[in-house]
């Protein structure tokens, strides 16, 4: 029975829950807590899938054999199949994560070298000093935009802006944008993105959805927006986003930027109660299935395999 519950839980956490959570508007008020909730959904889904793989062979053994026959070869086969199924899930996820991490770091190293080569040295100092561990690079470009390239051990991250960004934004807006990008670098938001990208790629196509990955990416941008707001004010951060939205980017990108701008102008901030409730929900997603399903199942299954 535990395998049925865990399979159902894994499917719900991989499909309906992300679909509903991605459409929720309250998450924009507490982006940090909402990201933790998304991470809890992902962890609970993986644990439920692994648990289901471990429990299913034991459940079949119970159904197909008499209690006195649950020893010897049938028991070895059930344990072996359970270990194999669980290992396939874990190895696939870890393999995708490692491969993605290696490819991403190779690509970033090339990107850092490229922006260092193409940067306009005479304007790199125009903005002033940045937080330690961050280097500013200004590239030629008629469209205002900014992004960051995370560093690695022993190498500084890059905040990259175009010349049009310097020309378009006022000093406060530019400072807010740089604070936004530095927040990404300082909190290593790239690692959070990598985790959800790996999970998306590792999931079977039948249950794969971009909603979790895209929703977390948007929440990370809002979290970085809040860092710019705290240091330079709502007006500066919203003004910078307004300039980026009118820069001629894709429609989808503009819609996202305008959504973030409107959120700031509406002074959307969640209260402590909402944040605490979200954190508690994240903990419950992992703890409750463990206490109500996994622990009782272990209590019944371990004696079957000779563990008292």
Image (cartoon, rainbow, N blue to C red):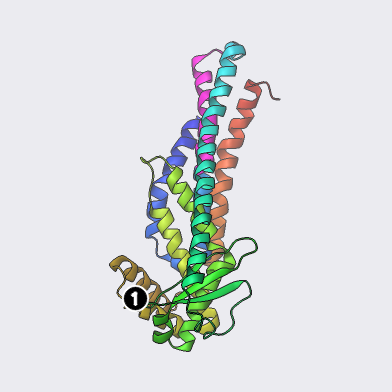
**Residue 123 position in % (x across, y down):** 49, 83
Give the residue drawn at x 39%, y 76%.
261
| Camera-nearest residue between 254 and 212 | 254
| Quarter of the image with the C terminus in it | top right
Query: In the rendered structure, which segment of residues is drawn in magenta?
Result: 46-66
How many discs appear? 1
Apparent side of residue 163 relative to residue 121 in the rendered image (left or right): left
In the rendered image, residue 102 lying in the magenta stretch gets the answer no
Up-down: is 218 above or below 288? below
**Residue 71 position in % (x across, y down):** 61, 14
Give the residue drawn at x 39%, y 46%.
15
For the view shown, which residue lies furthest in the front direction? 117
Q: Is residue 270 visible?
A: no
**Residue 108 position in % (x across, y down):** 51, 60
Magenta span main SS: helix
Q: Is residue 287 visible?
A: yes
Apparent side of residue 19 relative to residue 51 in the rendered image (left or right): left
- Element at badge 1? helix
* Quarter holding residue 144: bottom left
Up-down: is 89 above or below 164? above
| Camera-nearest residue between 248 and 253 | 248
For the view shown, which residue lies furthest in the right direction? 308
Give the residue drawn at x 48%, y 63%.
111
Q: Which residue is mark 1?
A: 245
In the rendered image, residue 55 lying in the magenta stretch gets the answer yes
Up-down: is 270 above or below 281? below
Crowding around mark 1 (Cα neighbors within 10 Å: few <14, some 14 to 19, many 20+) is: many
Give the residue drawn at x 50%, y 75%.
137
**Residue 29 position in % (x across, y down):** 46, 69
| Camera-nearest residue between 12 and 216 | 216
């Amino acid at each position: 029975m535990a395998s049925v519950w865990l399979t159902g839980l894994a499917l719900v956490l991989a499909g309906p829950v992300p679909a509903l959570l991605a459409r929720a508007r309250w998450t924009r008020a507490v982006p940090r807590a909402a990201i933790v909730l998304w991470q809890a959904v992902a962890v609970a889904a993986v644990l439920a899938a692994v648990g289901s793989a471990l429990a299913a062979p034991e459940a079949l053994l119970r159904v197909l054999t008499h209690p006195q026959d649950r020893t010897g070869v049938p028991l070895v086969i059930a344990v072996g199949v359970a270990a194999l199924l669980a290992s396939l899930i874990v190895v696939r996820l870890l393999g995708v994560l490692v491969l993605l991490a290696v490819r991403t770091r190779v690509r970033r190293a090339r990107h850092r070298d490229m922006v260092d080569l193409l940067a306009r040295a005479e304007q790199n100092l125009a903005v002033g000093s940045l937080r330690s561990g961050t280097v500013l690079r200004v590239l030629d470009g008629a469209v205002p935009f900014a992004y960051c390239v995370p560093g690695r051990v022993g190498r500084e991250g890059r905040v990259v802006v175009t010349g049009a960004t310097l020309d378009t934004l006022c000093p406060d807006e530019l400072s807010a944008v740089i604070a936004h990008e530095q927040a990404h670098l300082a909190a290593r938001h790239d690692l959070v993105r990598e985790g959800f990208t790996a999970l998306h790629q590792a999931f079977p196509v039948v249950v794969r959805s971009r909603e979790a990955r895209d929703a977390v990416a948007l929440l990370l941008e809002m979290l970085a927006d809040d860092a710019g707001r705290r240091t330079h004010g709502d007006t500066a951060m919203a003004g910078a986003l307004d300039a980026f939205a009118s820069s001629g980017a894709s429609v989808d990108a503009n819609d996202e930027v305008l959504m973030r701008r409107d959120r700031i102008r509406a002074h959307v901030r969640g209260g402590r109660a909402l944040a605490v409730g979200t954190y508690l929900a994240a903990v419950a997603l992992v703890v409750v299935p463990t206490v109500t399903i996994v622990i009782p199942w272990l209590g019944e299954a371990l004696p079957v395999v000779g563990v008292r």
